[in-house]
Amino acid sequence: MDRPGHEIRLLKEGYWDHTAVVEMPDGSVRVRKQAKSDDPDKIWGVESLRREIHFLQRHAQDTTRVFPPLLEFWDRADESGNPQVGYEIPFFTHHRDVGSFAREAQLEQNTIDDFQEKLAEALLMRVHHPVTDSPPLSRHLKQTVHEALLGLTHDPLMIPLVEANEITLNGRPALGPRAAWDKIVNETEHLASLDAAPTVQLHGDFFLENILWAELPPPAHIPQLILIDPVSVAGVVTGPAVFDLVKYESYATGELLGLRSEWVDVSGFDESGHSNEFHYTINWNEPGLKPFRDRNWHGVFHQRFVDHHGPINRRHYQLIDGYFSVAMALNTSGKQRKARLLKAVAEFADVLGQ
Ligand SMILES: Nc1ncnc2c1ncn2[C@@H]1O[C@H](COP(=O)(O)OP(=O)(O)O)[C@@H](O)[C@H]1O
Ligand SMILES: [Mg+2]
């Protein structure tokens, strides 16, 4: 599609979309994000970007904005009928995403604590407004976990674990992921309890890489903290508040980086299905995780979250954590896939075991 201006810097070549800094004919710069709609497999990304635009439009009316203003957006079909969906927001030259700050470990803990205070204020006061017409999250969880476990059985290495009844994980008895999930769905009230929790508007993809922060205070009209990239790829925008906490802590503790980078030990996978002893640990001593050992990116935020929403229901937390793990097991491969699936087993065992 012919939008004016030309790309001067790629920000992210994502699976679903392409995000870049663009220089406009008048010399100004902005960020342009476009869905990769030429690939029929990626049509999901188009829907997801539409929801993101819709979310940012709704927030445009907020006077105390925490999301960037939409400068432009479009949704049309090209000559071949392919949808062309995209939007533009200002490029924040004083800001960087907080994931990059966290991985560098340059900031002092008191600066990080100050950041967490401001982040809690932005999320809890500006985003987590109560909503009453939220579709039950359990419906989405049931469908996603079911489909992900089915999808994983296309991988011969995963079949024995997915279909196992009883296994041991790190020496502890546990049900296989499908058996555990079926039990949660059919024999417990945990999903009903999750649906009964108060629902709020969520960020939906709330983690450090989707938060921009300026180390030095920016010019007066620009906020120091800006939230970007709302809405989870699965389209969750409302639900229990803990949904955003789970995602935030998975990254802020270093766990997500450990999984993504495969700084994990996994064992027990064997196509014959004879093994039912599995092990899974994150290598917390890995040098790449040192920044997350040396600095705490979640403690202050967690406390503010509890002050606002009340004590965390651990089962709700583990249900959502397990759901993310299974969904991401399907979308990854190799050691990471094994680790994600075993993490889901551990979460589901905790849901069932307390
Ligand atoms: N307006 C912006 N100003 C500065 N950096 C940005 C801006 N928007 C995005 N970025 C950078 O680009 C990255 C990817 O953008 P994002 O919207 O999160 O795309 P994706 O959906 O692919 O994750 C962000 O993590 C951040 O580092
Ligand atoms: Mg992002």
Image (cartoon, helix red, strand yellow):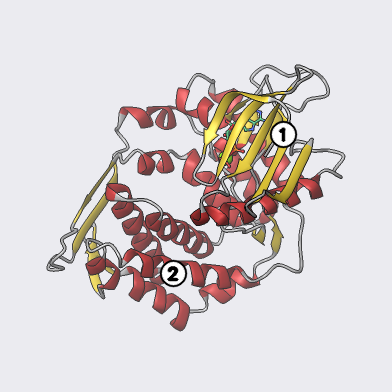
Query: CB at mark 2 closer than 8 A to ligand 1?
Result: no
Using the image as rendered, state which of residue 106 and residue 340 is in the foreground: 340
Whether 73 is drawn above or below 80: the answer is above
Closer to viewer: mark 2 or mark 1 = 1
Tell me residue 306's x, y (percent).
Answer: 63, 51
Q: In screen coordinates, is 277 left or right of 110?
A: left
Calculate the distance from the C-alpha at mark 2 to the C-alpha at mark 1: 38 Å
Give, as a three-letter code, the residue at label 2: Glu
- Secondary structure beneath dot 1 equals loop
Quarter where residue 113 is shown: top right
* Quadrant (top left/top right/bottom left/bottom right) for the C terminus: bottom left
Tell me residue 339's x, y (percent).
Answer: 31, 52
Return the mark for residue 334.
none
Q: Residue at label 2? A: 147
Quarter where residue 257 is shown: top left
Query: CB at mark 1 closer than 8 A to ligand 1?
Result: no
Return the mark for residue 3.
1
Q: Name the residue located 19 percent from the left edge and 58 percent from the top edge.
A: 269
Tell me residue 173's x, y (percent).
Answer: 25, 68
Tell me residue 160's x, y (percent).
Answer: 22, 68
Residue 31 visible to the viewer = yes
Whether 198 is drawn above or below 116: the answer is below
Using the image as rendered, state which of residue 33 and residue 135 is in the foreground: 33
State if disc 1 and disc 2 touch (CB < 8 Å). Answer: no
Using the image as rendered, state which of residue 93 and residue 161 is in the foreground: 93
Whether 237 is drawn above or below 140: the answer is above
